[in-house]
Each structure stands twice: as structure tokens, then as C-alpha cells.
Amino acid sequence: MLSWSDARDYCRAHHTDLSFIENDRDNDEVYTVTQGHQVWIGLHRVRWTWSDKSLSPFRIWAPKSPNYFEAREHCVGITHLQEWDDFDCTDKMDFICHGVPTLKTMIRMKMKTSADITDPATNAQILQQLSAALTRQGLTDFKLKWKTPPRKQKERPEF
């Protein structure tokens, strides 16, 4: 259980951000995951924007909400009734993070070299040089891995 800003910071450090709910399906998924517990979501009162500053017209407010009680309720949680309500951002509640699936891209390369590319030290050096080249191009969030396909055996003629 964390305050809204601490929950947002945790989600940004370990996932992507606090959850975004942009339609009934998203709301149902969050409600299913949280098993009806009251949790923080990413909406907050800066013109009711998501924590990533994006806008969404979708809202499922509880009756008489948002009420901005005592001018302190700036953050939004989903209630046990699957509706949204505004809360004091310093309240401590459970939360749900939004994540983005990891994308994998495989690049196949043919190399002509006199070096022994089965040598692990050579493989490490090639990966290091590729990593440096990608970083110079502005890419920062990647992992390189060397994968050698099994060699095909040449068919032997049958006699």
C-alpha cells in the first residue's frame, strides 16, 4: 500500500506506469485483477489526465464523484464497486501497474571472416561492437544475444 505518487514512482521504476483505463474492457480487466479491492489507477486531477499526461474521455465515476472533498482529493482509485472515486493522494492504497509486453526482434546476419566465430571471446567482442554501434544511433533499451543455429549436415549420397 502506497500513496498515489509513490505507487506511480514504483510502477515507473518496475513496469511502465500506473494503470490507464480507456474503455469498459480495460476497467473490467483491472477490476478482475484487483479482485474487487480499492486500488490507485493513473488518473489524477490536473484536468483529469493520466499519469503520463495523456487525455481520455472515458470515465466511470461513482455517484457524486468526483467531489474534491475539502479540496484535497486529486487522485483517482477504482472502488470495490468497479467505479472511480477521487481520493487524497497521500492516502495509502494498493495499486495496479500498466506494463508493456517486451518485444523481441531477431536479426539474422551473415558474416565473412577468418575469425573463429565459434569462440566465445570472439562472440562477446562482436556483440560489444554491435552494442556500441546501436548506442551511437541513439538506441538505449536493448539486449543482444548470440544465437548460433544448428549446422545442417550435408546430405550424403546413398549407394
Image (tube, rainbow, N blue to C red):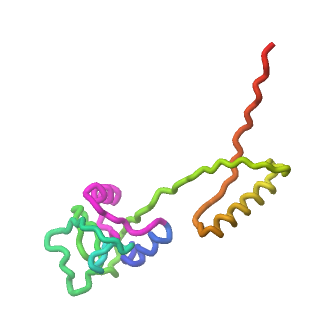
Horizontal side, residue 95 vs residue 48: left or right? right
Q: Is residue 36 magenta?
A: yes
From this view, report whether residue 152 is shown above or below residue 85.
above
Against 143, residue 6 (above or below) is below
Does residue 107 appear left or right of residue 148 in this picture? left
Residue 85 appears at what percent x and percent y? Answer: 23, 72
Q: Quadrant of the C terminus?
A: top right
Residue occupying the point 75% across, 58% down:
126
> Which residue is found at the position 69% from the left and 41% from the top?
149
116 sits to left or right of 130:
right
Q: Would you identify the image quadrant in which residue 60 lies?
A: bottom left
Name the residue: 29% across, 62% down: 22
Extent of the magenta region: 15-42
Residue 74: image location, x then y, percent: 28, 80
Place residue 47 in its image quadrant. Answer: bottom left
Check the image and name the residue furthest to the bottom: 70
Residue at the (79%, 19%) spot, across then down? 157
Question: Farthest left residue?
Answer: 64
Q: Relative to the observer, which residue lies in front, 110 or 101?
A: 110
Q: Is residue 22 above or below residue 67?
A: above
Residue 151: where, in percent of width, then height? 74, 37
